[in-house]
């Protein structure tokens, strides 16, 4: 039997597909070992060299069609790329958004916008790593967002506030969801919002003030104060008033890609926990001989495998152009739960050493915790399934 890529037990995962993609990303990731991510975490720095290398090798342009300079892969392969980054001990959170944000531009942007931005994003000349949706006062209730854009001649004038907007300091461009028609003037609350492509190089200091938010893990995220920001009207993506739908369109890809990162984290935790449980001798035997130690690791592994199946199922539906809202959401929930379970199993089986930074467990533990909350919280996924899959009454 062939050993699985990362040697978890003797079982070869039949879903260990796209080996060429896996191997390529894995080779690149070996240049950024634990010590690299540990230092970046300690310094709360941005993994600049890693992101440059990933971009330079073309992996971040996986979803950009070949005619615009990308490799035209599907979400399945893109998810394998991010899985491998996390599986190597790294953190895709520094750059994953480029993959799913770009979809808004690709699917709804004009030909002119695509020609001017996508090749530069593919080559790394421009970074589109930021998207501004969440607001401090409205949270998950996105349609109530209060940031407004008013058309004045050939510009939009934007005012409002956003919170938890990631990678702004390391991105050139940001997609920004704004209200262009007041809520009381639209038939449906999902109408009247628009997506603007904001050039952060012009906007920061000239309409956007950035206040960094320090978080429990190393993740560059910010509060944005927007005062009379002028955005050229030609930077409107798609039609005015339809922006919420464009953002929703991108969410299935986002869910699947994050699920894959969680799967990568989950395998990483299981591998580390398994290796440690074999090595650590207490009471004259490896701790992994105790069922109390091995069962939580084994259960976490079982759940990661199950989540992985749902992730590939959702990705394949997405790539086939079939509806996959339920599957994408379910894969995100299952994978986030599985990686969190594996994180707990790993920290527990490492005993006190799980808390020592040099073992990296506590770092990944902090990183993977995010996915119970962002980009969509577990409760909201359950509400989606209850309402849209089971036909239960809408609860909010
Ligand atoms: C590190 C980080 C990075 C982020 N990056 C970005 C980014 O780049 N761009 C961006 O736009 N956003 C970003 N976010 C925001 C993220 O998407 C939101 O935090 C998330 O969607 C939850 O919204 P909220 O924080 O306003 O929580 P709230 O909406 O205030 O919810 C708080 C809690 O209440 C629960 N809840 C709310 N309503 C209901 C209900 N009806 N039923 C059951 N439970 C409910 C939620 O599940 C949640 O647990 C980021 C967040 C973090 C922490």
Image (cartoon, helix red, strand yellow):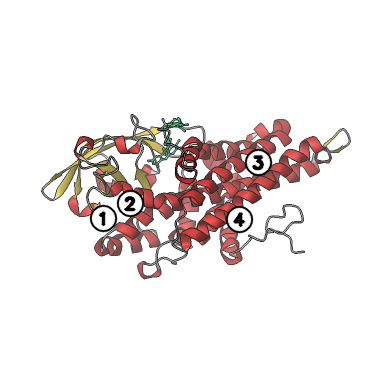
Residue 238 numbered tag: 1
Question: Which of pointers 3 and 1 lies earlier in the amino acid sequence?
Answer: 1
Position of residue 52 measured from the top left corner of the image (x, y, whole percent):
45, 55
Rendered residue at 56%/59% (across/down): 25
- Mark-to-mark CA distance, 2 and 4: 37 Å
Q: Which quarter shows the C terminus?
A: top left
User: Pointer 3: residues within 10 angstroms few (<14), some, or many (20+)?
Assistant: many
Tags 2 and 4 in contact by the CB under 8 Å rule? no
- Residue bearing the label numbered 4: 30
* Secondary-structure class at tag 3: helix
Question: Which of pointers 2 and 4 lies earlier in the amino acid sequence?
Answer: 4
Question: Which of pointers 2 and 3 lies earlier in the amino acid sequence?
Answer: 2
Nearer-the-camera pick, 140 or 96? 140
Question: Which of pointers 3 and 4 lies earlier in the amino acid sequence?
Answer: 4
Position of residue 229 measured from the top left corner of the image (x, y, whole percent):
21, 40
Tags 4 and 1 in contact by the CB under 8 Å rule? no
- Residue bearing the label numbered 3: 342
- Mark-to-mark CA distance, 3 and 1: 42 Å
Tags 1 and 2 in contact by the CB under 8 Å rule? yes
- Residue bearing the label numbered 2: 246
Q: Is mark 2 within 8 Å of ligand 1?
A: no
Question: Which of pointers 1 and 2 lies earlier in the amino acid sequence?
Answer: 1
Q: Nearer the viewer, mark 3 or mark 4?
A: 3
């Amino acid at each position: 039997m062939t050993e699985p890529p990362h040697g978890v037990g003797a079982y070869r995962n039949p879903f260990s597909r796209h080996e060429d993609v896996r191997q390529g990303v894995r080779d690149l990731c070996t240049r950024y070992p634990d010590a690299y991510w540990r230092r970046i975490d300690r310094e709360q720095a941005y993994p600049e060299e890693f992101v440059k290398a990933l971009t330079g090798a073309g992996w971040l342009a996986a979803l950009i069609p070949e005619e615009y300079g990308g490799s035209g892969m599907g979400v399945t392969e893109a998810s394998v790329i991010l899985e491998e980054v996390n599986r190597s001990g790294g953190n895709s959170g520094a750059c994953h958004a480029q993959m799913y944000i770009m979809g808004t531009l690709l699917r709804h942007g004009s030909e002119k916008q695509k020609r001017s931005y996508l090749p530069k994003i593919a080559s790394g000349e421009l970074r589109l790593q930021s998207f501004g949706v969440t607001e401090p006062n409205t949270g998950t209730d996105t349609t109530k967002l209060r940031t407004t854009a008013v058309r004045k001649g050939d510009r939009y004038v934007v005012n409002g506030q956003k919170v938890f907007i990631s990678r702004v300091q390391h991105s050139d461009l940001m997609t920004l969801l704004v209200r262009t028609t007041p809520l009381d003037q639209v038939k449906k609350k999902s109408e009247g919002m628009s997506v603007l492509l904001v050039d952060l190089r012009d906007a920061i200091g000239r309409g956007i003030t950035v206040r960094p938010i320090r978080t429990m893990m190393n993740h560059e995220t910010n509060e944005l104060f927007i005062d009379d920001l002028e955005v050229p009207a030609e930077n409107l993506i798609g039609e005015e008033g339809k922006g919420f739908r464009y953002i929703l369109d991108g969410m299935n890809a986002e869910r699947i890609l994050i699920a894959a990162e969680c799967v990568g984290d989950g395998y990483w935790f299981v591998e580390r926990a398994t290796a440690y449980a074999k090595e650590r001798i207490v009471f004259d035997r490896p701790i992994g001989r105790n069922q109390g130690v091995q069962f939580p690791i084994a259960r976490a592994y079982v759940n990661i495998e199950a989540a992985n199946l749902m992730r590939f199922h959702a990705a394949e539906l997405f790539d086939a152009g079939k509806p996959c809202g339920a599957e994408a959401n379910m894969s995100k929930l299952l994978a986030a739960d599985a990686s969190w379970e594996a994180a707990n199993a790993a920290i527990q089986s490492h005993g006190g050493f799980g808390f020592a930074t040099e073992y990296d467990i506590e770092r990944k533990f902090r990183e993977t915790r995010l996915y119970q909350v962002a980009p969509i919280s577990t409760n909201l996924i359950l509400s989606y399934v209850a309402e849209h899959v089971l036909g239960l009454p809408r609860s909010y």
